[in-house]
Amino acid sequence: MTTVQSAHQPPRTGSNFGFSEASTSTMLTPTEARDANSSAAANDSNTGERQLTYIAAISEALREEMRRDPNVLLMGEDIGGSFGGAFKVTKGFEEEFGAERVLNMPMAELGFVGAATGMALMGLRPVIEMQFADFITTAFDSIVQYAGTNYYRWQGAVPWVIRAPSDGGMRSGPFHSQNPEAWFVHAPGLKVVAPATPADAKGLLIAAIRDNNPVIYFEAKPLYRSLKGHVPAGEYVVPLGKAHVAREGTDLSIITYGAQVAEALHAAAQLTEEGVDVEVLDLRTLKPMDTEAILSSVRKTGKVLVVHSATQLAGIGAEVASLIADEAFEWLDAPIRRLGGLDVPVPFSPTLEDIYRPNAAKILRLARDLAAF
Amino acid sequence: MDDLSTEQQTSSAQHKLTRAEQVELYYWMQLTRTLDEMTVALWKQGRGVGGMFSQRGHEAISVGSGYALGPDDVVAPMHRDHGCYLLRGLTPRRIVGNLLGRAHGVSRGRDANMHGVGDLNFNLIGFISHLPQSLPVALGAAMSFTYRKEPRVAMTYVGDGSTSEGLFHETLNLAALFQAPYVLIVENNQYAYSTPLAQQMTVEHIADRAAAYNIPSAIVDGNDVEAVYAVTKTAIDRARNGGGPSLIEAKTMRMMGHAIHDGAEYVPSELLAEWEKRDPVQTYAKRLIESGIIDQVELDEIKQRCAVEITDAIEFTEQSPFPAPETVTEGVYAP
């Protein structure tokens, strides 16, 4: 079970579902940030299941893979020493694995992603922490032109992973809130992953590290400490390229990924109260995309809303909509709807960011209209 | 320039080339020159596919430096380093196959001319058109050797043009920071496409920039194969012994256009005439004959052998199939 813990959290059930436009996620205080991954797994008092936050699940995946395979090493800015990264994902790692496996980098993303490619060609498996997904543009050539094309060109495999903390709702402004996944889906040779739950955060990261291709792993930083859920201990791999039905339903499909899965589940819970049975499909991997899971859901419900935090224009939702129009047109009972960010830089001020970014309330409105179509 | 140049003198003595090695250096340069001349002729006859880059004038750099590598060392050459690819063990058939987009080419028809000519069986990393990208990739290979405590070195090449990209700075800084076993050869051939050095930078020598990173550097006559070998060997030995990275600026002249389509009318003809007198292949042949290392008969035999090898590669390739169209989506991802 996954539970969302947030100071601003609206009730998840109840007849009065009138939560505001405000995001369900919270901004971290410096104190919370310091406590990042240090919290040991806690058991849920009701179910007895082992619970971890989303960010602790990421740390656990890294730690377990580094213990398992000496070829796995970390690179990134501020990840070493006692600091352990801007979000503290690698706190304590240098102590356990040594500075030669936790490579603290100067601000040179283009250079160190290129170096990771060279290491990967030699059989290492570097995992790069991009401090924020927004900064990934500085390494664009190294990712898209070199790493993504290499295997096709001369069969040199490039097994690295870039962890990219993405998404907003945290009042972090235009350069600490972006969702650039569509650029990388558009580029040949890369795999793109976007976990929505703590369990997937662990299982997909482990799968990404073991994959023999460059994988960009977009972690949803609004979920870091707000989302807690069951995470299996030890070896746990979630295969890349497989979507997950986060909630079964028959009337309408919400197809989404990352932080918007939790938002869609909130909206779905409310729609149940209104007599609409919503299916929520979590894509989990954006490339390769699980097209069969998308089409199966559409054939079941006949109505589709695609949601992502990233800009709606030319986003993943457009590709999903096109796939459905091509392959499942005869199953549709309503136009395909999309909900994504506005075509503006991610704004800072709360009133602007809340209008900019999709959330459960907006999903609810669109889904309600679609159900009534 | 400083300490590497000083070491070079000691080092040349230490790495005194045997007669057999000198003949071998000549052979590789002549094979490179023959490959270049015969493939340029193909394009002039309309038998080429797409574009191609002549390496004419770069033979001493690619052969002299490549010859200094050990078998386990890794190298990422560029588009004018045919000599390095050949002496690492790629056959002329596979190289010409790549130039002509055939299925048996190194990139199986996936990448153009000398791009994508990488094969880890020969410890060769292929380059991309964004040439400075080879800088950090080779550095990463070098860092993997440090990590695994292997006595190996990684070497790469860029032209003068690439040194204006930000990645040149990022990589040299990282190489110095991690004291990586890394050697960078800058092939200064005076022009980045049509842009001469004076419009690219204000420093007289690219090697001068190495001081900013605390990296030893050297300037070498890029048309003197033995000098290139000696200075590279010094840098490689230093890297292998834990002495960190080096930058070598090899000065030469691009004797043809940027690529086959380019007549390079922007290059003064007097400049080309002056460099023609310093042709690296012919001056080395002359030196070997004058010093009695080799006689004209043996020289002619080598030339003949090179012509036979390249003729075979061209004939074989022209009779070989292009990749099957239905394979276009194959091999995007590693299994």
Image (cartoon, helix red, strand yellow):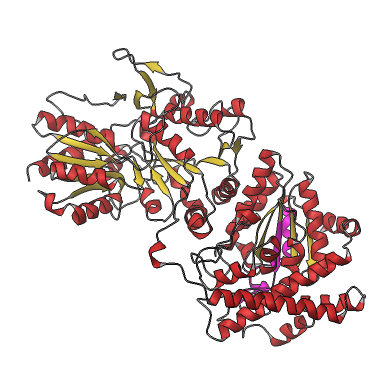
Q: Is residue B285 left or right of residue A267?
A: right
Please tell me whether residue A82 is drawn above or below residue B255 in the rendered image.
Answer: above
Residue A193 placement (x, y as % from top left): 39, 42
Q: Quadrant of residue A263?
A: top left
Residue B188 magenta = yes
Q: Which residue: 48% across, 58% down?
A: A152
In this rendering, the answer to whether A232 lies above or below B53 is: above
- Compare residues A247 and A266 and report the one nearer the observer: A247
Residue A365, position as x, y percentages in the image = 15, 40
Q: Is residue A64 visible?
A: yes
Q: Nearer the viewer, residue B233 or B84?
A: B84
Which segment is the magenta one?
A: B184-212
Left or right, residue A157 beside residue B295: left
Total labels drawn: 0
Quadrant containing the N terminus of chain B in the rendered view: bottom right
The answer to whether residue B7 is left or right of residue A180 is: right
Does residue B318 belong to the magenta stretch?
Answer: no
Q: Where, by quadrant of the figure, is residue A105 drawn?
A: top right
